[in-house]
């Protein structure tokens, strides 16, 4: 079993050399043990909690190792809920490691990944959902993902889950009152009203489940494939979107033999762009493998930019596009992109059905690229469901919500079939159990280990 009796320490700043580094301690003896390596321990011990003070660290030979700033936080008013110390030293790797070695000689232990946040959870400073949000904030690489992670850390997801559990407790209480007084012919709640409350709970859980499609896209990035026949300007489009010469551009068809992947942030949303080899009948084994990889990428994509040469578009192109759309899954979205409009003759007209929702661009001249970017972000925003603040981004949360939904479905069937209240109550209790897994009201050491081992050391 996990023990919080140890006093732990870790370097909490990024690896490498910088101006300042942070060494963090937590545990009952954190303040006392950190004072043992200071030149002026009394100055530190007499300081107020949260007060940053100047001091010096002495090595084993009583020689000055570094001039530092140090602060203490007394339990329970700290990140972990325990006594804590943070040492701000110069960013030399040598100095950082020497400070840790001095602390180890005092009996301090090296912290495991995520152990500071794990202790915060065990000491009820935050629930499990909020703890997971800490890791998301650290890894966030877009403004929208950062916003969702901040909302989760502030307890928006937890509040919604707790509200659902409270409603389920009310339902369970009503069903158990029915059991206690059923023989006395006293009706405490109409079953139709209970069924209506049940359906409201199911609908809210379904909204949270549906929000994962948007949340996961924001968290992991939207996979976007740039597909089409050779020499339609796919690589030029990739370069324009990235604003750099990432892909080789040539008038010779088949220049791109393999997929090229890059990341792009548009309006705070991360897109994972994949430029593919032109889709056509291959002339050799290498080209055939490139085409095969193109189709593999299309299958995995969420958003597909189908690039078409506007100069040669005709009824056959429209027919091919319509056929392409029939092969898409419900989780995929196609944007037909007619490129090279700068090369069209003035009297040339492109007759494309509005139902295909095409967009006309010139990648070479950067024409209508902003409109294409807006279409991409509009698609992602259309995935949102329910409240803007309560969005599920964790696959673990999704799994628990789906199990909750299944339990509520069983309770609904039991109610409609007129089964005894104890059957209904049992299903509702199962739903509550699965919701409790999200916030940590129901947890075990194996689950906690799997969650916190993904954190960085020092957090």
Image: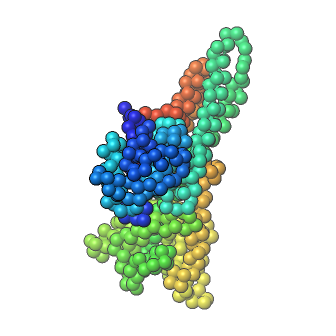
Residue pictured at 62% horizontal, 28% vertical: 169
Q: Is residue 71 visible?
A: yes
Query: What's the colour scheme?
Result: rainbow
Q: Is residue 235 above or below residue 203?
A: below
Residue 76's x, y, as percent?
Answer: 53, 38
Question: In this view of the protein, can residue 127 be seen by the observer?
Answer: no
Q: Residue furthest left?
A: 285
- Expressed as whole percent of the image width and height from the top left, the position of residue 1 reads 37, 32
- Picture residue at 56% right of the left edge, 48% below the top: 152
**Most foreground residue, 78 or 408:** 78
The picture places residue 71, in percent across and down from the top left corner, at: 49, 50
The residue positioned 39% from the left and 40% from the top of the image is 7
Q: Is residue 324 left or right of residue 370?
A: left
Residue drawn at 65 percent across, 32 percent down: 167
Which quadrant of the figure has residue 20? Answer: bottom left
Judge by depth and name the residue closer to the eye, 41 or 439.
41
Q: Is residue 429 above or below residue 201?
A: above
Depth order, front residue of 120/38: 38
- The picture places residue 112, in percent across and down from the top left corner, at 37, 45
């Amino acid at each position: 079993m996990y023990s919080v009796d140890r006093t732990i320490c870790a370097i909490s700043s990024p690896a490498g050399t910088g101006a300042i580094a942070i060494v963090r301690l937590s545990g009952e003896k954190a303040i006392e043990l950190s004072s043992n390596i200071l030149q002026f321990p009394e100055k530190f011990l007499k300081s107020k909690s949260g007060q940053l003070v100047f001091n010096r660290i002495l090595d084993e030979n009583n020689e000055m190792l570094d001039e530092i700033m140090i602060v203490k936080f007394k339990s329970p008013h700290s990140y972990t809920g325990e006594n804590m110390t943070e040492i701000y030293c110069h960013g030399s790797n040598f100095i950082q490691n020497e400070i840790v070695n001095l602390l180890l000689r005092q009996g301090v232990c090296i912290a495991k990944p995520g152990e500071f946040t794990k202790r915060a959870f065990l000491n009820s400073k935050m629930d499990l959902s909020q703890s997971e949000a800490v890791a998301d904030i650290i890894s966030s690489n877009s403004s929208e993902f950062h916003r969702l992670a901040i909302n989760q850390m502030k307890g928006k997801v937890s509040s919604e889950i707790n509200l659902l559990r409270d409603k389920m407790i009310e339902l369970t209480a009503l069903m158990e009152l029915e059991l206690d007084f059923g023989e006395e012919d006293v009706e405490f709640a109409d079953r139709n009203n209970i069924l209506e409350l049940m359906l409201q709970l199911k609908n809210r859980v379904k909204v949270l489940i549906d929000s994962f499609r948007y949340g996961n896209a924001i968290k992991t990035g939207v996979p976007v494939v740039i597909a089409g026949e050779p020499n339609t300007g796919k690589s030029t489009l990739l370069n324009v979107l990235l604003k750099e010469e990432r892909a080789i551009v040539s008038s010779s068809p088949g220049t791109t033999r393999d997929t090229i992947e890059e990341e792009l942030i548009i309006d705070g949303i991360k897109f994972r762009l994949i430029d593919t080899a032109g889709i056509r009948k291959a002339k050799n084994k290498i080209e055939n493998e490139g085409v095969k990889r193109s189709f593999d990428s299309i299958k995995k994509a969420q958003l597909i930019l189908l690039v078409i040469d506007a100069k040669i578009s005709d009824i056959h192109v429209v027919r091919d596009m319509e056929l392409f759309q029939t092969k898409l899954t419900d989780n995929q979205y196609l944007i037909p992109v007619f490129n090279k409009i700068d090369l069209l003759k003035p009297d040339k007209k492109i007759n494309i059905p509005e139902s295909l929702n095409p967009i006309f661009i010139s990648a070479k001249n950067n024409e209508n690229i902003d409109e294409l970017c807006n279409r991409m972000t509009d698609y992602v925003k259309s995935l949102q469901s329910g409240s803007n603040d309560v969005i599920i981004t964790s696959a673990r949360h999704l799994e628990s919500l789906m199990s909750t939904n299944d339990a509520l479905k069983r309770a609904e069937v039991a109610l409609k079939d007129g089964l005894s209240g104890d059957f209904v109550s049992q299903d509702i209790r199962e739903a509550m159990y699965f919701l409790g897994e999200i916030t940590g009201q129901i947890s075990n050491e194996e689950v906690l280990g799997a969650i916190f081992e993904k954190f960085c050391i020092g957090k």
